[in-house]
Structure formats: structure tokens, C-alpha cells
Image: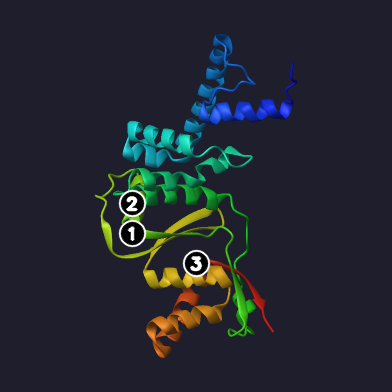
Amino acid sequence: MSRVSVVDLQRDFQQWLVHATPSAVIGTGARAMAGLAVYQNNYRAQLVGCLEVSFPKLRGWIGEEAFRQAAITHIDAHPPHAWTLDAYADDFAVTLAALFPDNPDLREVAWIEHALGAAFVAADAAPLAMEDLAAVDWESVSLQVAPSLRTAPASTNAEQVWTALWDGQPPPESEMLAEAGGLLVWRRGYTTYLKQVDALEYQALLQLQASGSFADVCDLLVALRGEAAGVAKAGELLAHWLSSELITGIEQGE
């Protein structure tokens, strides 16, 4: 009679929870299957509850049945991937995009709700003091963005929909934007902020997140707007980012 290791039992039990695949190691007798069904039901119910807690506004907006079907689809395709259930909602917007390809507003509202929660518990970072900028060489400086900053593309009026949902008001009809842009979520002190930005600012901020180089941001805007207009726009955006406390650190290069 072969011996079964604890590791094998744990692996097969996990496979049962995720995929409901009977395992010869665990056993497929009637009593064993009945007991396993209880565990799997509890597993799935807990994950549904996790998503309900993570997306209460989205759930209320699209309705209980649509939300539950989306949650079941997500659970079938995405087993937990981290040590904490707080991270389980990370990819729910991806599931909504696949499930409702003709309704990008659902994905974007879901992203907003999740990003606001994630930004609230992100690491703290003090805003830059104006005196810290006095001797900065903007050609070589590296700028650090707030650790709470989250960014995503925007193709719909999801920001307006979310604002209405948050305020307890009837949301406007969803519609596509005339020009795609971006969504920003970040925290200042104990308050989280949501802002929709145009495509130019979104591209510039993505560049800053990628390299930290203000010179790279200037080069991007010059390429898009021309020398004079690009440099002017870079200065305008920098002033706005600083006043919004999106930039929280500087590192002077050589």
C-alpha cells in the first residue's frame, strides 16, 4: 500500500477547491465527496464575499445577479494568488473586461473602486517642500511619484459615473469619451483623490512613472507639441503635479 505525503494531500485538496477535480489521493467515496463539497462551497462563498466587500458601489450599480455571475466567472478563472484576500480583487476589472467587452465602463468603474481602496492603504510619503526645489537641475533630476498613485486608461465617463455613485446620486448614462485619456487615483494625507486627465497628461505621467526623469517628460512633450509648446506644457504639468502632491521625492543626478 503506497504512502501519501502531506504535500500530496495539500496539493490535491487545493486542486479540489479550485477546480472540483476528484482526486484518488483524497478519495472519491460518497462520504468523502460530501465532505469535500462543503469545503468547496465555503471556499467559493468566501471569495464571493471578498469581491462583494471590495466592490459595494459596483455591485449596487450593475445589480446583484450580474455581479454574482461576474464573481463566479472570476473565481473559476482566478484562484487566490497572494497570502491575503485583500489582493484577490486585483484582477476583477480584467474579468469584467472579458465578460462584458462592449461595456468598458464596468471595467473602469471597478478599477476606480479598487484603486481608491488600494491607495488609501499605500505607504505614506511627505510632499515636497518648495525650498527643496530651489537648486534642482531639471536636466538631470529624478522625480519620485507618490507610492499611492494608481493610473489606468480611460475610454468612458466612468469618473462621472463613480462620482455620482459615491455621492448617492443616480449615475449618468455611460458613454464613450470623445478622446481617450487616463484615470489617476492617489492619496493626500488621509484623503484619496480621483481625477480624469487628457491623453497628453496621461502619457506624460506614465513616462514619469517609467523613468522618473523630468528631462524624458520634456522630450516626450516636445516630440508631441513642438519645442516651445512642449516645454511650456512640461512646466505647467510639473507645477500641477507638485501642487497635487503627486511628486514626493527628488534625486539629483550627476
* Disc 2 to disc 1, C-alpha distance: 7 Å
In the rendered structure, which disc, 3 or 1, sits on the residue that comes first in sequence?
1
Q: What is the number of the mark on residue 224? A: none
Q: Is residue 150 above or below residue 165?
A: below
Contact, mark 3 vs mark 1 (Cβ under 8 Å): no
Q: Pointer 1: what residue?
A: 155
- First-in-chain label (2 vs 3): 2
Q: Quadrant of residue 99?
A: top left
Question: Which residue is at a point 53% across and 66% down the rendered structure image?
Answer: 246
Lower sequence index among marks 2 and 1: 2
Tell which tag, 3 or 1, sits nearer the viewer: 1
Which residue is more in the foreground, 2 or 80? 2
Where residue 23 appears, x then y in whole percent?
Answer: 59, 23
Amino acid on which disc 3 is placed = Ser
Q: Are marks 2 and 1 in contact (CB under 8 Å)?
A: yes
Compared with residue 37, is residue 61 higher up or lower down, i.e. above or below?
below
Residue 89: percent from the left, percent from the top?
50, 42
Residue at 53% in and 26% down: 21
The span from disc 3 to disc 1 (Cα, nearest Å) is 23 Å
Q: Amino acid at mark 1?
A: Ser
Q: Which residue is mark 2?
A: 104
Q: Which numbered mark, 2 or 3, is in the foreground of this view? A: 2
The amino acid at mark 2 is Pro
Circle 3 residue = 244
Q: Position of 105 compared to 53: left or right? A: left
Above or below 21: residue 30: above
